[in-house]
Image: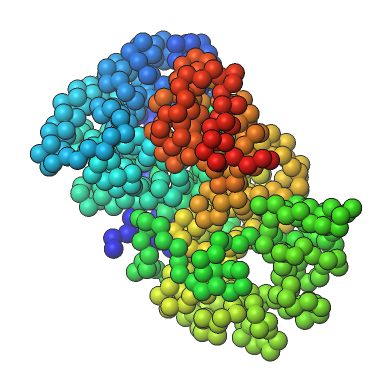
Amino acid sequence: MQLYCESLTEYKRIRTVEVKIGDLLLGNYHPIRVQTMTTTDTMDTIATVEQSIRCIEAGAELVRITAPSKKEAENLLNIKNELRKRGYHTPLVADIHFTPNAAEIAARIVEKVRVNPGNYVDKKKFEQIDYTDAEYAEEIERIRDRFTPLVKICKEYGTAMRIGTNHGSLSDRIMSRYGDTPMGMVESAMEFLRIARDKAYHNIVLSMKASNPQVMVQAYRLLVQTMQQEFEACYPLHLGVTEAGDGEDGRIKSAIGIGALLEDGIGDTIRVSLTEDPEFEIPVCRDLVKRYQLNGTNHTAAVPAITKVPYSPYEYARRESFPVDQIGGRQAPVVIADLSKLETITPAHLQSIGYIYDEPTDKWNISDAAADFVYTGNRLIDFALPGMLKVITSPGAWMTAPDKTKYFPIFSASEYTAGNHKSDHLNFVMVDCYSDGGPSNDHAYLHPIANDPTVVICLSSTNRNAMQSVRRMLVELELRGIKNPVVLITDSHQQTPDEHLIHFATETGALLLDGLGDGICLGYGNGAQMENIRASGRTYLDVKDIYQFTNNTAFSILQATRTRISKTEYISCPSCGRTLFDLQETTAKIRSVTNHLKGVKIAIMGCIVNGPGEMADADFGYVGSGPGKITLYKGKEIVKRNVDSNIAVEELVNLLKENEAWVEP
């Protein structure tokens, strides 16, 4: 199997074609560029200019502006002139969907245009049509006739172009042949790319966006492989998880999708799509990108190369493991809460990880996001535990535990081999993957634990290339036929809440997307980093409690990778100039009345461009259809049109009730 990247064991960016966007160079090992998109009405020149300036001053290197029709495309000239007059020369990008005429106008004005191959020529009607090869070829020629004028204009004016596929807006023609798949996304873009190449136009960037990070990552990998096979070259890639949402969830989902690709050297520019003001996207982008500016102090170890990948990176399949207690097999991944830095553990601390003690009734209330295990280091807990919770301790503490059905030991690989006292039911064994001072690369330490029916292997690494180091160890386990379940252990040495979220989501999410991992445990390098979260004033953080923050992050990572569903999922688009209602306010209102509906996916889309197509994964949709009007969907089917926005949230709740998706909070 041809690899989709330069290396699976160290960070190496793939080489891409150099693209010029105004004075900005993209691809060909130039720095990873960060960008965002305005949310103002494009016809409001001053508002758009001023918001663009806020984004630029926050660090945006490109600013995208929607141009849904000819009048908005024409007004881009006024916006550009005003920005230049104020001394700002950041390249502008026109966002085009359904209107080729608007794209052709914008391409003469701004430095880059973005077109969506799913709706630039095709009109999506959600019809399944079978095409003969001849009919399919006729459709390609129709696209060529309609797309070629834009290519010629871009070539003449030196304008760059992004061919931006979205998972939710594939054309009926693509859907009929490839289905709603990563391969369909790739072919949708490749059709347009081939036409551009035929005209000797190469100033092109591509993207493969989806609200599901799993689909997104697979599509980008396939696109890289396809371009390399067909052209022996790769065009620059714009990375993003579309409709990621807001707050902590939006940051985590974006970091998982974008970070998984950046870890493998894929990506030349990124945008984090949050349902927040666009200038707030830029710091998150910068936190993601700075991980790959290799000037830090963490060691990058030489990890043995991967010559054979024992799983497909283009489709999801969970690694096969046998169950040990509630870990592994077909069971949902577990969450382990690290409470080892606490001097004493009280029932209040367990409340932080999902266990609420009610003293009058002497009962525990257990949330859907309750940790499965706690790690306490060298100490035992001196009060009666909730029935479901289990404790991991050092071997010495475990030996003194009165209840060996609730307490289990954790060993290093050498301790487990040498030890005489082990649990006959469940043992955790730590493996430091390819770090200096860790086990040798001959993997001899794996022999005593391999397929031991009581052992759960805990993998971690102190290397800069930690994710790749852990992945290499998981490959080794597969190649050796070792089927023990695996827990991913990730410590963060970052400073801010956003940095912690990005670190945890990237390091663990990249592995979970490939089906690697039966549990996660997140921790911190020192107390100062924990204190930074307590002192954080970020508005999306509901708590200052570090343990609740970490526990929520763990469950959010599992939710975003679709490996364990513990809450409602919101597919919420970032606002833009097309938006027909206040997205942030509406998202908060919908979340407040539906956040107890575990496993239900609700899309909140500002306009018809983003819905229904962009909400391909959603069970229900709330879509702006006109000023003050909302259309409600069940899946891709319209069920209520032009609902007054004042009652639309109540109507959404009624729709949930009618379809038996509602439970009383």
Q: Where residue 646 sits in the image (x, y, percent)?
A: 59, 18
Q: Where residue 337 sits in the image (x, y, percent)?
A: 69, 60
Q: Residue furthest left?
A: 134
Name the residue at 63% across, 42% down.
663
Query: Is the image coloured rainbow, by chain, by secondary structure, or in one colour?
Result: rainbow
Q: Where residue 475 sits in the image (x, y, percent)?
A: 43, 69
The vertical placement of 207 against 150, above or below, is below
Q: Quadrant of the C terminus?
A: top right
**Quadrant of residue 415 in the image?**
bottom right
The vertical placement of 585 against 30, above or below, is above
Name the residue at 53% across, 15% down.
628
Say whether residue 74 is visible.
Answer: yes
Name the residue at 55% across, 41% down.
660
Q: Is residue 137 left or right of residue 12?
A: left
Q: Residue furthest right?
A: 360
- Toward the viewer: 526 or 662? 662
Name the residue at 83% across, 66% down.
384
- Toward the viewer: 119 or 292? 119
Say whether residue 85 is visible.
Answer: no
Q: Quadrant of the N terminus?
A: bottom left
Q: Where residue 550 sits in the image (x, y, percent)?
A: 67, 52
**Quadrant of residue 237 in the image?**
top left
- Toward the viewer: 142 or 594? 594
Q: How many discs mark residues in the rendered view?
A: 0
